[in-house]
């Protein structure tokens, strides 16, 4: 309904087509009270279901979120908003049929809230055009006491800060941080809480304007004694592997439910918004302006692993899973342009190519053949620790490190040497090596006479590094490798904030035959040291994450 009093801001006139397509989505109900009003400081939107929310007219903050008569928004005197709040902004509102749109303009940034008649959802889009505005996230701040938990990303129970101001330890030695989500972007569709018959969620967008690809890890939510926060991260500087992308990102959805998960119809890859086509949002491209990429299959795969196909250029990113049986993949909703196509075995790139996408059409690719040489696992090895997946999976403490600090009481000791042939080579080898913690770990192995008579290539794969940490090796305390140059890696924390994902890199060392022991009954030793002049101490000293280690035949 239109505002009953004077409206301080201009009211938008939306296209009539915005009223079309009222397909039922999660949280639908009677729409008898659908409309908006102006309370002087806020635009008040009633979805006609069980949700009423307010948007500040001066700054575009989400100032109130009332569901079933209960206020959920806010803590510490703070609202929900882009970044830490935009400040003075131009805020407008308009209604056309079944849709209400609130538009926020702050310099070159545009932010939008949309409500649909009869839904307990708020649809959000954010268009960051350049670096003039520091807008990398939307945070939904939630009042204290409504969704208490003690999960890894929670620090409700007043723990002690052990790193920066965002990693904490409880009295029992377990660690907590908002960074400890456990999840890669590809692993989740929504994040939130459920309690007392109410679910409060943010359903993520397709991340086409985000950076880092399908395996990127970032904070998703936090919980403290002051309240909780749910995030849609559009760009986050920690352990970031790609430049920032610009343009309209969304929709991401604030969804209220009866305690269950949000409807799958809201999930990225499923959600369609034809009703938004005529709303006039800056940078919006509807389904008709997008194309699809489909591949008939991928050969040369190791079927023990999942394969992912990614598309990326400077403007957008997308990904899809390859079918286990034959490698077929389909990636819809792609903006027109030319993309680098990458095939990942788990998280390791094993093929790259290019593909051009045209609006309204499907680009069909013939079978992609992965050359055997592209997968380092295919090389014949005398011994191998782990496997080449682009992850430290299987190594000691690897799973724990996606949701805990290395100092956590649950972590197995970071020291300890490894014997080839023991059957525990991978599980006994620590997933991370640091200069100040466990540098100098030794691998023991035997060689046959023929093997000891020849030079061999040693390979150490890493997934990321902190403070330029990289491995230098010593064989039998007689031969020492040169110090390798550091590969390009993110310059921020990684190993201590739940992420091993950086730029996969393989170090190779040509070990001469003179370095090996000629006694076939004796153990050769490989000592792996972490070298770097950067970093500080302990778990913030120079370090690296291990993918695989092998000695080639």
Image (cartoon, rainbow, N blue to C red):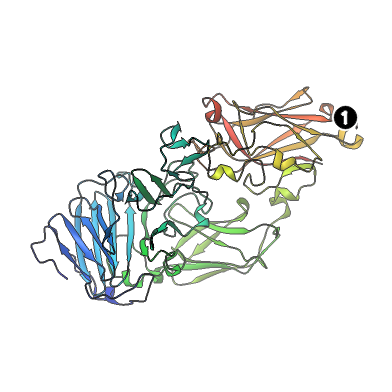
Local secondary structure at mark 1: loop
Location of residue 243 in the rendering, given as x and y in whole percent from the top left corner: 44, 45
Residue 503 visible somewhere in the drawing: no
> Residue 103: which quarter of the image?
bottom left
Location of residue 46 in the rendering, given as x and y in whole percent from the top left corner: 23, 66
Residue where numbered disc 1 is placed: 522
State the residue in front, 470 or 455: 470
Location of residue 88 in the rendering, given as x and y in whole percent from the top left corner: 19, 47
> Residue 113: which quarter of the image?
bottom left
2 lies above or below 379: below
Circle 1 Cα neighbour tier, 10 Å, few/some/many (<14 / 14–19 / ≥20)? few
* Image quadrant containing the N terminus: bottom left
* Residue found 84% across the figure and 29% down from its top: 516
Labels in figure, total: 1
Q: Is residue 157 left or right of residue 375?
A: left
* Residue found 51% across the figure and 25% down from its top: 536
548 lies above or below 311: above
> Residue 284: which quarter of the image?
bottom left
* Image quadrant containing the C terminus: top right
State the residue in front, 163 or 319: 163
Q: Is residue 424 left or right of residue 536?
A: right
Residue furthest top in the image: 478
Location of residue 472 in the rendering, given as x and y in whole percent from the top left corner: 67, 28
Residue 254 visible somewhere in the drawing: yes
């Amino acid at each position: 309904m239109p505002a009953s009093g004077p409206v301080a801001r201009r009211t938008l006139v939306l296209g009539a087509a915005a009223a079309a397509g009222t397909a039922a989505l999660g949280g639908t109900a009677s729409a008898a009270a659908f409309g908006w009003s102006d309370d002087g400081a806020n635009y008040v939107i009633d979805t006609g279901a069980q949700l009423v929310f307010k948007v500040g007219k001066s700054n575009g903050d989400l100032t109130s979120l009332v569901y079933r008569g209960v206020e959920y928004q806010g803590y510490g005197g703070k609202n929900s908003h882009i970044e830490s709040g935009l400040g003075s902004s131009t805020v407008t509102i308009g209604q056309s049929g079944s849709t209400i749109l609130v538009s926020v303009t702050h310099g070159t940034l545009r932010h939008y809230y949309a409500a649909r008649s009869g839904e307990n959802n708020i649809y959000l889009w954010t268009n960051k055009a350049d670096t003039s505005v520091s807008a990398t996230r939307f945070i939904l701040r939630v009042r204290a006491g409504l969704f208490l938990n003690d999960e890894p990303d929670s620090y409700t129970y007043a723990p002690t800060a052990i790193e920066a101001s965002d990693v904490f330890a409880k009295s029992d030695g377990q660690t907590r941080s908002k960074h400890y989500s456990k999840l890669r972007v590809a692993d989740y569709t929504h994040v939130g809480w459920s309690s007392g018959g109410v679910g409060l969620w943010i359903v993520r967008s397709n991340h086409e304007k985000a950076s880092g690809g399908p395996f990127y890890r970032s904070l998703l939510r936090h919980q403290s004694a002051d309240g909780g926060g749910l995030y849609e991260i559009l760009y986050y500087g920690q352990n970031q592997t790609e430049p920032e992308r610009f343009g309209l990102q969304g929709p991401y959805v604030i969804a209220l439910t009866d305690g269950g998960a949000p409807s799958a119809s809201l999930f990225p890859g499923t959600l369609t918004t034809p009703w938004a086509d005529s709303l006039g949002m800056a940078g919006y491209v509807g389904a008709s302006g997008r194309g699809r990429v489909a591949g008939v299959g991928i050969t040369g795969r190791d079927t023990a692993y999942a394969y992912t196909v990614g598309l990326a250029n400077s403007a957008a990113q997308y990904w899809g899973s390859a079918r286990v049986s034959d490698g077929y993949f389909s990636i819809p909703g792609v903006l027109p342009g030319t993309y680098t196509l990458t095939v990942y075995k788990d998280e390791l790139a094993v093929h790259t190519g290019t593909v051009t996408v045209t609006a309204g059409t499907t680009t069909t690719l013939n079978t992609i053949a992965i050359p055997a040489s592209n997968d380092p696992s295919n090389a014949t090895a005398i011994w191998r620790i782990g496997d080449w997946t682009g992850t430290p999976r299987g190594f000691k403490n690897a799973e724990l490190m996606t949701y805990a600090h290395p100092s956590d009481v649950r972590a197995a000791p970071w020291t300890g040497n490894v014997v080839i042939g023991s059957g525990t080579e991978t599980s006994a080898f620590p997933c991370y090596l640091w200069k100040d913690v466990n540098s100098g770990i030794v691998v023991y192995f035997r060689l046959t006479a023929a093997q000891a008579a020849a030079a061999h290539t040693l390979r150490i794969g890493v997934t990321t590094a902190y403070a330029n940490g990289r491995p230098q090796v010593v064989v039998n305390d007689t031969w020492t490798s040169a110090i390798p140059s550091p590969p390009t890696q993110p310059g921020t924390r990684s190993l201590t904030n739940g992420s091993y994902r950086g730029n996969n890199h393989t170090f190779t060392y040509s070990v001469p035959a003179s370095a090996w022991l000629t006694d076939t009954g004796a153990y050769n030793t490989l000592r792996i040291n972490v070298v770097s002049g950067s970093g500080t101490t302990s778990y913030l000293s120079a370090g690296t994450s291990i993918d695989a280690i092998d000695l080639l035949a």
